[in-house]
Amino acid sequence: MEESNNNFEPRIIAFVCNWCTYAGADLTGTSRIKYATNVEIVRFPCTGRIDFMLLLKAFAGGADGIIVSGCHPNDCHYTSGNFHARRRWIVFRNILNFLGIDVQRIRFSWVSAAEGAKWADIVNDTVKEIRELGPYTEYKKVANYLDEEADSHE
Amino acid sequence: MNKLQERATDLLKGGTVKLIIGFEQGNNKIRPFFCEKPEDAEKLIYSDDCSTNNAVYLTKKELIGDNKIAIIATYKEIASIIQLNKENQIKKENLMVLTVDKDGDVTELTSFEEMEKFCEENTPAPDPVVAALIEKIDKMNREERWAYWKSELDKCIRCYACRAACPLCYCNRCISEVNCPQWLDPWKSTLSNIEWQINRVMHMSGRCTGCGACAKACPLDLPIGILTKKMSTDIKEMLGEGEGGNVLSTFNPNDKENFIH
């Protein structure tokens, strides 16, 4: 059954680095800031470790939106992991866009360990945006062999 | 015998090289030719009509081993050799690069400076069909682009001819063969076909020389060549030329983007 947009609860997967954004999200909690519960956080040692395939797997596995976040430039725990990541996302986002995959559903951000409030804002914003966009069915259909057009093998 | 064949005979007779990779006339088409015996040299021809980029053989250890070899190269091969050298995949002392000009004279390109000069002077005009298709897709809205690629890539039979044809796809174990974790489903499905192409393009980013061998190798004539083509132009715009061409193994602290907030 298709969920109507009114009661649609987006499923957001957040890929975050251990040193900044994960600690920042921790701070959000310890500061008792309330934010949307739609987000599932996956912790990585560094944004440089976040393979672009993981984002595609998240969409295939049912994510409606994705957050990718790590240390601000020049603040990386490993000096340059986020610089490498930034390049990767520049290229990757471009490829996805050319292939017609919805890049609006991927939110890239820098959140430091001190930015607990920013993390709450980002999650709330993303949830709001994805709620407006609706469920990401296009990609899921293909992933689950449910796409009629693609299945017909004309 | 023409000048190329004479030169080849000399090289093989004198033992200067063990193998010459060149072209021969096959059934209705030009095909790669591996010349090991002086008496076979008369089969060698020079043509830039061959759909194969012969530089693909230079990373095949089982074929060339540690032997001295010569390659009869067109623009395509030379551009790939330059990139392979930047990635330390070529033993220059074992490789002789020969080109043939329009008079049939054979020239040896002894240094990479010479090869780069050759490429600058002989850059082929961009393929208008490719350019038109990229423009057409760029003009589509996102849903149309998705529908287009979904229906095109759905046809892919995952033969990996695009991978086999590319001189720069030389990994001993390709991500498509990695099964721990199983990044890509090994069977043909629209999703894994799309994922495979995304991987191919990402791994090729900034390295593709635009020879078009992948697209020519595709038995289904899928427009996969435009993916790498589009990426190489966009990457130059977004990140600049990049050292060694490989943009993703390095970074610039001043990289500009407008989507990370």
Image (tube, coloured by chain):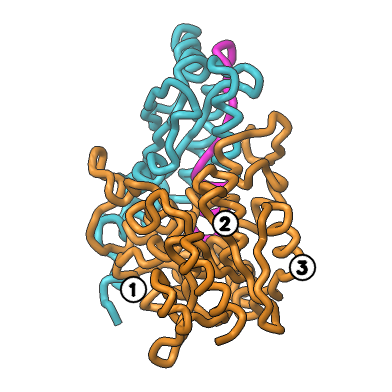
Chain colours: A cyan, B orange
Q: Look at label 2 and name its amino acid.
A: Ile
Q: Position of residue A70 (x, y in %)?
A: 53, 24
Q: Chain of mark 3?
A: B
The residue labelled by disc 2 is: B81
Give, as a single range, the part of the protein colored magenta: A91-115
Q: Quadrant of residue B189?
A: bottom left
Mark 3 and mark 2: span between their CA atoms? 16 Å
Label 1 vs 2, first from the N-terminus: 2
Mark 3 lies on a secondary structure that is helix
Residues at discs 3 and 1 in contact (Cβ within 8 Å)? no
- B165 or B240, which is in the foreground? B165
Give residue B197's position: percent from left, percent from top. 42, 58
In the picture of the structure, the residue carrying the numbered disc 3 is B121
> Please, which chain is the residue tagged with disc 2 on?
B
Secondary structure of the residue carrying numbered label 1: loop
Mark 1 highlights which residue? B155
Judging depth in this view, the residue of A148 and B111 nearest the camera is B111
Q: Is residue A106 shown in magenta?
A: yes
The alpha-carbon separation of the residues under discs 1 and 2 comes to: 32 Å
Task: Please determine if labels 3 and 2 lie on a single subunit.
Answer: yes
